[in-house]
Image (spheres, rainbow, N blue to C red):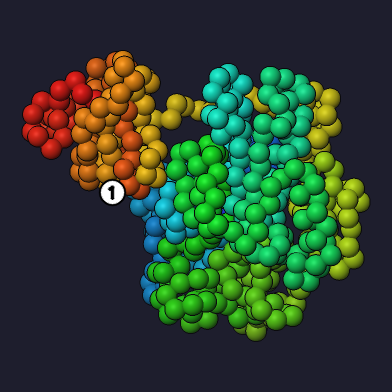
Amino acid sequence: MQSSSGPAPTRIVCLGGDYVALFLCRALRGAIRRGLVDVTVISRDNFHTYHGFVAEMLVGRIQPGQIMSPARRIFAPAHFHNAEIERVDTGAKTVTTSRILDGREQVLPYDHLVLGLGSTDDLARYPGLAEHAHRLRSYWDAFRVRNDIISMLEMAEIETDPAERRRLLTFVIAGGNYGGVEVASELSEYFDLLVRKEYPRLEREEFRIVLVHSGDRILPELGQHHPKLADYGQRITERSGIEVRLRTKLVAATPEEAVTSAGERIPTRTIISCTGTAMSPLLDQLRGAERERPGGGRVCTDACGRVAGAPEVWAGGDCAATPHPKGGSYPPLAIYAMAAGWRIGRNVLRVARGEAPKPARFAGLGDAVSLGRRRAVAHLKGIPFYGLPGWILWRIFLLGFVPTWDRRVRLVVDWVLTPLFGRDVVNMRLQQPVGLGREMYEAGQEVVRQGDIGRRLYLIWKGEVEVVRQEPNGVEQLLAVLGPGQHFGETAVFSNVRRTATVRARSRVELVSLGRSEAVALSESSQQFAAAVRRLPGTGAEQAPVAH
Ligand SMILES: Cc1cc2nc3c(=O)[nH]c(=O)nc-3n(C[C@H](O)[C@H](O)[C@H](O)COP(=O)(O)OP(=O)(O)OC[C@H]3O[C@@H](n4cnc5c(N)ncnc54)[C@H](O)[C@@H]3O)c2cc1C
């Protein structure tokens, strides 16, 4: 909407399409219409994810789509550019994106760049977490967890081995922050309901929810300024039957257990991580930008939202360390990301008009966290609310920040209908677990079991495994010891027979696994691959029918 006679509009490019972008566009809506600025929001998803109701979505209280708002509606009249952001060149003032189909690149010039890239999960710090813990960061993470929970219940219902049944019904959540506490509390209520109706053959006592938290008490976001609210939250959480492990971290994970820093090994098939954040690698490309700590952390901004050391670059939300008017920096919460988007929008306009930007005065509005069963703790400008009043406030508070009216109405409809019809326990899993995966096992754990159907081929990356066969007389015979670079699982995958041996980790072992259809396709298209995987590891001989 550029005016034909006036100066060219100031070009503003926003990286990331969530809370920062949402309020940036709201602040600039009038200026876009008047042709003063030209705003483009770039994001890999063409929707905004509303994290506040992720826990309700996981437990089928609301339909999955209710937490997504269409980018083209909420950012209008700004342009929306749906692609992966690849590079930022603050010297040339360009952003390079690649399209999802084939990686073809496009270059977008800007006058002002706004960073709303959020954060990512850092699960690489402990072995096995990246491979076996779920994240809740993106919509797709949450959608996968929702369906996996239902899968666990379905498998447990028909499981005859009591130990495996209990493992399927144990849910370990890492992080006693808002996200972790809400997920644990919602799961507790969900399981109460499901054993009464949909899963009568499961006993409520068979379920375990373990919340692992590194601090002295859960809800650290509240604990600092509102210790009474945090204490109440902890009491309710423990009374809900959730096992809270304080001053404890998850230090390793395998497909069948979670290992804590206290040395506890918790048999489980589901680990949900709500902790451990890392910054987008795109921040490393900002020339001269100051970071929270040398070489990493959030980008530092002044109180106006401008990135220190990088002219015409602004940042807000989870990727920015912006000074809080009361000291410290803004915490990584949605309300501060929204305030940052708004403030940056107004300030870019001021700068474009040749005026000085204004520093942030926003010092927070309130906090609220749901504890399940219509209870919450909340405060509004420091006034505390507990239990049902807190929960009503929490719902109103969060509903008010849902970006579109259409999603607000749909949420309310779900809230009214769910108590009448029950939770949605449809497993919407899109496909079988195929493809390339990474797995980690601790010494003594079985990777494949003799007699099972073989669905995956394994390549050893680190560690050692032993291949053993159980003879009819019950004696176990050691067939081979395999190490890095060797493989197993090919007999069952290629010959379509059951596993002919058990493969057990001798040490901590890290594996790359390949789904059957991919392994077959690779061996049909590459003779070298076919020859290599059919050869008995370490001998060069054609694979004998020893394994697995
Ligand atoms: C499970 C969960 C529950 C939460 N609950 C609450 C709560 O109850 N209350 C609260 O205040 N806060 C809550 N939060 C925190 C809140 O969601 C964050 O503070 C907020 O999302 C930060 O907003 P943002 O705009 O900075 O970044 P984000 O919301 O993280 O958005 C980042 C955007 O950047 C895009 N992006 C990143 N890299 C690229 C790339 N290379 N190419 C293209 N696009 C890219 C992403 O797609 C996304 O659109 C919760 C968070 C989680 C994960």
x then y, percent, for residue 264: 54, 50
Nearer-the-camera pick, 331 or 303: 331
Q: Quadrant of residue 450?
A: top left
- Count of marks, rendered view: 1
Q: On the rendered structure, is 17 left or right of 187?
A: left
> What residue would you read off at disc 1?
462
Classify 10 Å Cα crowding around label 1: few (below 14), some (14-19), many (20 and above): some
Decide: is 471 above or below 99. above
Q: Can I make out residue 47 in this image? A: no
Mark 1 vs ligand 1: CB below 8 Å: no
Q: Residue at x 66, y 68 (%)?
A: 331
x then y, percent, for residue 362: 75, 73
Name which residue type carries label 1.
Lys
x then y, percent, for residue 150: 61, 29
Q: Can I make out residue 169 in this image? A: yes
Q: On the rendered structure, is 299 left or right of 513?
A: right
Q: Residue at x 78, y 61 (%)?
A: 230
Which quadrant would the N terminus be assigned to in this image? bottom right
